[in-house]
Amino acid sequence: MISQTKSPQSKTQLVSVIQKLKPSTKFEVVEVFNSSDKQTINKMFDKYHKQNGHFSVMFIDGGK
């Protein structure tokens, strides 16, 4: 898990937490460009929830 009860408040904190994760930790990235990608996100959510029961979700808005 990336956070326990408090999410990282900066990129530095996030990087520190990620570096401490087990090497076997899996990452999957999905770039969302429009609302049609919602189905992909929902499928991923269901897959991870079924497999593990818990996982972390990050939303990164790169701005315009």
Image (cartoon, rainbow, N blue to C red):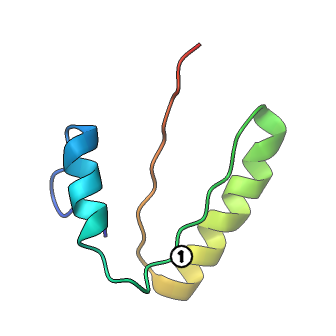
Which residue occupies the foreground of this view, 47 or 23? 23
Can residue 2 be seen at all in this image of the molecule? Answer: no
Q: Tell me the quarter of the image containing the N terminus.
A: bottom left
Residue at 58% in and 83% down: 50
Residue 38, percent from left and from top: 74, 46
Residue type pointed to by label 1: His
Q: Tell me the quarter of the image containing the C terminus.
A: top right
Which residue lies under the disc numbered 1? 49
Residue 4, percent from left and from top: 18, 64
Which residue occupies the foreground of this view, 32 or 52? 32
Q: Secondary structure at mark 1?
A: helix
Residue at 44% in and 86% down: 24
In the rendered image, the vertical position of residue 58 relative to residue 25, given as above or below: above
Q: Residue furthest left?
A: 5
In the rendered image, the vertical position of residue 39 relative to residue 62, given as above or below: below
Total numbered labels placed on residues in the image: 1
Where, by quadrant of the figure, is residue 42 drawn? bottom right
Which residue occupies the foreground of this view, 50 or 2? 2
In the rendered image, the vertical position of residue 56 relative to residue 60, given as above or below: below
Can residue 3 be seen at all in this image of the molecule? Answer: yes
Label 1 Cα neighbours within 10 Å, binned few <14 / some 14-19 / many ≥20: few
